């Protein structure tokens, strides 16, 4: 009986946390991804045809961001629709 009450208490606690902070967490994730994309654009924009920083600095940072480079290029080069835009 005690295990059932503990599970119910855990469920209600998780439910209330999700109810109150889910949108905040989603917004924070989107903001983090947007800032990461901006950073990658500033550093490796020349791969998309936008030369911003000298290649010397890009090459020094390159080993640290190499794992995220392919997914970033796919996100940046993906075609966007007007319905996907959050702010107009």
Image: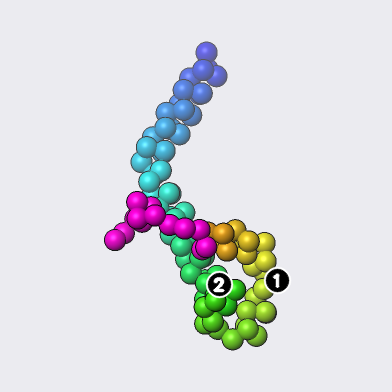
Q: Main secondary structure of the magenta part?
A: loop
User: Residue 18 lies in what quarter of the image?
Assistant: top left
The residue closer to the viewer here, 8 or 26, is 26
User: Residue 3 lies in what quarter of the image?
Assistant: top right
Residue at 59% in and 86% down:
54
Residue at 43% in and 57% down:
80
Question: Is residue 44 among what the camera can see?
Answer: no
Q: Is residue 48 left or right of residue 21?
A: right
Total labels: the figure holds: 2
Question: Is residue 77 among what the camera can see?
Answer: yes
Location of residue 53 in the rendering, given as x and y in whole percent from the top left corner: 55, 83
The residue closer to the viewer here, 79 or 27, is 79
Dot 1 crowding, Cα within 10 Å, few <14, some 14–19, many 20+: few
Residue at 59% in and 73% down:
47
Which label was assigned to residue 63? 1
Q: Is residue 79 covered in magenta?
A: yes
Location of residue 83 in the rendering, given as x and y in whole percent from the top left corner: 35, 51
The residue closer to the viewer here, 33 or 3, is 33
**Figure quadrant of the C terminus:** bottom left
Task: State the residue lying farthest toward the top.
Answer: 1
Which label was assigned to residue 48? 2
Q: Which segment is the magenta one?
A: 76-88
């Amino acid at each position: 009986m005690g295990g059932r009450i503990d599970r119910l208490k855990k469920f209600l606690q998780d439910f209330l946390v999700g109810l109150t902070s889910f949108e905040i967490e989603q917004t924070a994730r989107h903001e983090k991804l947007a800032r990461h994309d901006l950073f990658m654009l500033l550093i490796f924009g020349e791969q998309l045809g936008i030369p911003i920083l000298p290649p010397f600095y890009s090459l020094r940072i390159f080993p640290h961001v190499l794992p995220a480079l392919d997914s970033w290029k796919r996100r940046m080069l993906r075609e966007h629709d007007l319905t996907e835009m959050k702010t107009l």
